[in-house]
Image: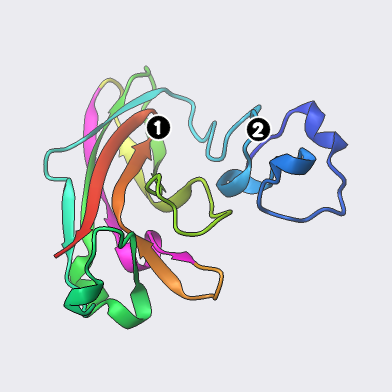
Amino acid sequence: MTWYPESFAKVPMSDMNMRADPSRGYPGRTYRFYTGTRVYGFGHGLSYSAFSYKFLSSSPSKISLYTSLKADKLLEDVDHVVVDDDMQDCTALRFEMQVSVMNLGHLDGSHVVMLFSRWPNNKVVEGSPTTQLVGFSSVHTVSYESIETSILVEPCEHLSIGDENGKRVLPLGNYKFTVGDTHHTLSLQIY
């Protein structure tokens, strides 16, 4: 869970809006929408050791989508694809993010590797989450050794967002995946 600073106590408990609203000084709620400072972020402190991460070269850096959009709609200003209508087969887009985890501490133990994504800067939906947990993997780590793990990413499920009409859309552009402080960019485009 996200631990908020003491100043968050000024936010009325009855205000259950998730999305941040800067016009009234509302910072939002949960790791997905909160824009303020955090005492502890979501997933912080799940282990007694310290870890470093590295995305492996087998993690993709580009995915091209096949859509049923008409040729006249494939203009340069197309910034998203409607998942339900335009995608031929979402299961074909699945891929695995390969991550190496190094235990930097003197204790062996279990560790939860959490993969987050951030949408491209050209967000289609106003008020969409700032970050999203894509998946996680629990690994047993040995002191001062590394281990590899993978997390399945299903773009139609994990990278899509609901628009103002309730349709699932998949924004095009560069997604930023993070594990700890390590980043990996994935370009999602149509062909």
Q: Is residue 49 above or below residue 190?
A: above
User: How many numbered tags mark residues here?
Assistant: 2
Magenta stretch? 145-162
- The quarter of the picture where the C terminus appears is bottom left
**Residue type beneath disc 2:** Gly
Q: Is residue 9 above or below residue 173?
A: above
- The quarter of the picture where the N terminus appears is top right
Residue 133, x across and y down, in percent: 45, 51
Residue 138, x across and y down, in percent: 37, 46
Dot 2 or dot 1: first in sequence order is 2
- Which corner quadrant of the image does residue 172 belong to? bottom left
Which residue in the structure is indicated by mark 2? 36
CA distance for labels 2 and 1: 19 Å
Badge 2 marks a residue whose secondary structure is loop
Q: Residue at left 56%, top 69%?
A: 164
Give the camera-side residue of 157 and 73.
73
